[in-house]
Amino acid sequence: MKRIALLSLITLALCACQSNQRDSSPSLLKDGVQLRQKTVAVDAEHAKVIMKAEGGTNPVEFAIHREGDPDPRMETLGTVMDTGEGKVFNWIAKLNQTVASATLKRFPQLEIQADPNKKLTVSSSARSQGSGAYYSCGPVMSTFSPEKAKVYLVEFQFKNNRAACAQQVFDITDPANRVLIEGAGGEAK
């Protein structure tokens, strides 16, 4: 009887672990305390993709799918959160960033290296609940083909209407000249 109960518990635990997404997001158990997110260098053979949130403080989860990947599931990269830099006192923004990064694994941005001329699909969604309020918007999807040695920004945007959000893709290789990638954005309500 004990063996049957143990096998049932193991089977139940294994079934609960299956998901529609792969998860490579940082966790406290896997990565320990991190005061900063991992960064990616730009090189001549790849593109750099930065993912950020703008216009709200709710956490935003990003996931990607790379063209040619044998696993069709989206890969969860992690969660970003606007810490208020440039909107509140700098020390408050830094304190928010340190606490959110070290404990909650919510960073101001996520970075990945992308293969050139292979479609990259980025999905983002925002969800939070607290003190009787619930917010949910997304998922919003963008698909584009990065080019060698370029830097891209995928920006999740909270809209004035609390039930709406959007995602846009920009070429920010020249930081002073932010170029919108036409046809790569999306909206959700």
Image (spheres, rainbow, N blue to C red):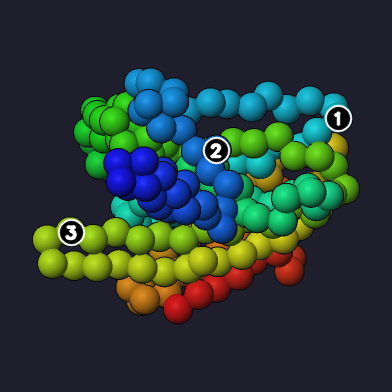
For label 3, the crowd category at 10 Å Cα-Cα, with few meaning under 14, some 14 to 19 and many 20 or more, is: few
Which amino acid type is shown beneath numbered disc 1? Glu
Residue 24 circle label: 2
Q: Please name the residue shown 47% across and 68% down the image.
A: 138
Residues tagged 1 and 2 counted as in contact (Cβ below 8 A): no
Give coordinates of residue 103: x percent, y percent.
29, 31
Q: Is residue 64 visible?
A: yes
Could you say which quadrant of the image residue 185 lies in? bottom right
Precedes in sequence: disc 1 or disc 3: 1
Whether the residues at callouts 3 and 2 have beta carbons within 8 Å, the answer is no
Please name the residue shown 81% across and 39% down the image: 115
Residue annotated with mark 3: 130
Which residue is at the front of the view, 76 or 102?
Answer: 76
Viewer-nearest of discs 1 and 3: 3
Q: CA distance from mark 1 to mark 2?
A: 23 Å
Check disc 1 and report the residue beneath it.
45
**In the foreground, 71 or 166:** 71
Q: Is residue 90 above or below residue 68?
A: above
Q: Quadrant of residue 150?
A: top right
- N-term mark: 3 or 2: 2
The residue at 36%/41% (across/down) is 3
Tell me the amino acid under the disc marked 2.
Ser
